[in-house]
Image (cartoon, rainbow, N blue to C red):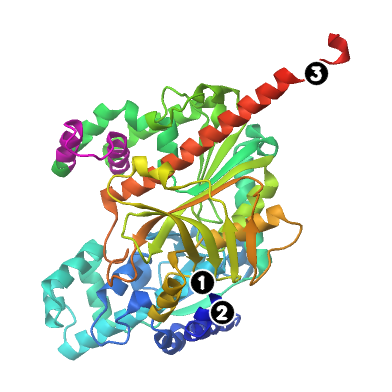
Amino acid sequence: MQLQTREVQAPLEIFHRTYHSLLRSSGEIQIQALVEPYLAFDPALHSGAQQAKPDLAALTYTSLRLPSCIDQVRLILLGQSHEVFDRSGRGNVTSWQPVSAPGRRRKMFFDGDSTLAVLIASPSDLDDLIPILVAFQIEWNKLHRLFTEARVESAAAEAMLQAIGLSEHDIERLKTIWGVHTRARLEQIARNKKRFAVRMLGGSLMDYERATLRWWWHIEDTLPDLRLRNRPVYFVSSNTHSLVNLLSGFALRNTDELLHFIRQRGHTELLVEYERIAAEQEPTSRENFFYYVQKKYQRDPDSEAYFVQRGLEEQTMGIHRIGSRFYLDVDVQVMELAKLDPACIDPRIRLPGVERLRESDAVIINIDYPLGLAAYHIFKIVARSVGSLRGVYVLGKAATLNGKIGDVLIPNVVYDEHTRNTFHFASAFSAIDVEPYLVHSSVLDNQKAVTSMGTFLQNDPFLDALYRDFFTDIEMEAGPFLNAIYEHTFASRYPTAEVVTFLRPPFDLGLLHYASDTPYSKGSNLGSRNLSYFGMDPTYASSLAIARRIVEQEVARIEKVAAASHSRLPDLAEI
């Protein structure tokens, strides 16, 4: 596979090498210096980059991954922690205005003028952010040129966009993603050409590892009574809603309040959906429906008491939520299996013997999935800090070359672009573990996955080369996790450009990806559509497979320990 892709990756590697080498400088780097090598590799997510016409798919994708203050920003400062910014003379950036982007978790702070401080967890953040800044600047400046040629500086948003020849559909798309900021942003674009500059502060391997270690110390300090260093652990990288909803069952105990919410707020389409589910005219899961409504309810100002009660009940069930503070933007949930109530958990995971979890000393550590190489640092820190690992399960988004959006992909081969390693392993999951809970899509197991360096760091020749070698699952975390698992398994650092086979992994291991992009279908990516309600289908089907696997594994472990203790020989004191 790497032989077939080396030649087609050459322009991409030049772009990648260019910005990584430039960022070694202690001064500011102009994003404009990266435009030429960026255009040369012709990224698949920005197919209209070289056209005079705006590429609204790329503009949508980048807009959703940058904070709204980006209109005012000239300089982007990059560092691993607030201490790095302080050491460089920038002061306490955490006192600046915290800002966020709807489509990317990353800690960012705006000084209110023209500087944005961004905390990066690994080099993968650079591989994500730098191409996004290049693409956004290209598209901004296209619009600026069109406004200048049309001599339009200020008017209603629709009038400004019509003046430069955008269709009604395109106008509605921009208004949807930019919302109330649409007119102000368009006027800013018309007045000013965008000239981003970036500056790297820190950037050593030690800086990344130090930030990750301090992220973990915060978790240990928050939960000292759990003594995580002595506990068996099931490690899950997924999200912060699905697994906890399945194991707490809070939404299912409060369906009346959730139905009242959608009636009171006039969510007619949800009421119709619920009535179809209740009448068995719609195969969608009733449980998944209420999990989705609860997520919408959380944004309602009248929901405060509901979620306070949820927090109290989760505490009694041994479910602990730890938000990230100053370092990695990765929230964590720690769940004590012995305190879960079998009568309250989602009925689909009430397996035979589930009541024996009361005897368990194990915990689940569930993290909000990290980006790229941050997975390597996180897993290394967690694996060496807990008592023992019983299972490792990774659930994340992926692009698919042979399926459709919403499909679940289960790989047993992963090629990692960072190290050029190819991993073979026996997956804990197969199609039968997910299919019973998936309504609208398909499950594709025995897939070959590629861990890409970044979503923008792909072009059509590269995708073609992957497909010829039957690599159909493109994501960003599996390779880093597997490199860390290698170091947990063998007495050496992970290799490079090798084939690694986990015949007997040291713990249960499974990867699940749900397709959110189809690169071969132009425009069918997260920049142009949202998984929305039907995104719950693959997410919860996959989370159910993980939850059921954990229950099965832990019940089997408890029964094995109990059987061993009953069959032991009596000691001398008993004779």
Q: Nearer the viewer, residue 157 or 339?
A: 339
Per the picture, the main secondary structure of the magenta-coloured stretch is helix
Describe residue 235's horizontal placement relative to residue 251 as left or right.
Answer: right
Q: Measure the C-alpha gap from mark 1 to mark 3.
A: 59 Å
Q: Return the disc, 1 or 3, that comes first in the chain's sequence.
A: 1
Q: CA distance from mark 1 to mark 2?
A: 8 Å
Q: Residues within 10 Å of mark 1 (few under 14, many from 20)?
A: many
Q: Quadrant of residue 279?
A: top left
Position of residue 443 in the picture relative to residue 563 (left or right): left
User: What residue type is disc 3 on?
Assistant: Leu
Which amino acid, mark 2? His
Q: Is residue 464 part of the magenta span, yes or no?
A: no
Looking at the figure, which quarter contains the C terminus? top right
Q: Which residue is mark 3?
A: 569
For mark 3, does the 10 Å Cα neighbourhood hold few (<14), some (14 to 19), or many (20 or more) residues? few
Q: Nearer the viewer, residue 253 or 289?
A: 289
Q: Is residue 565 left or right of residue 137?
A: right
The secondary element bearing badge 3 is classed as loop
Residue placed under numbered mark 1 in the picture: 126
**Mark 2 = which residue?**
20
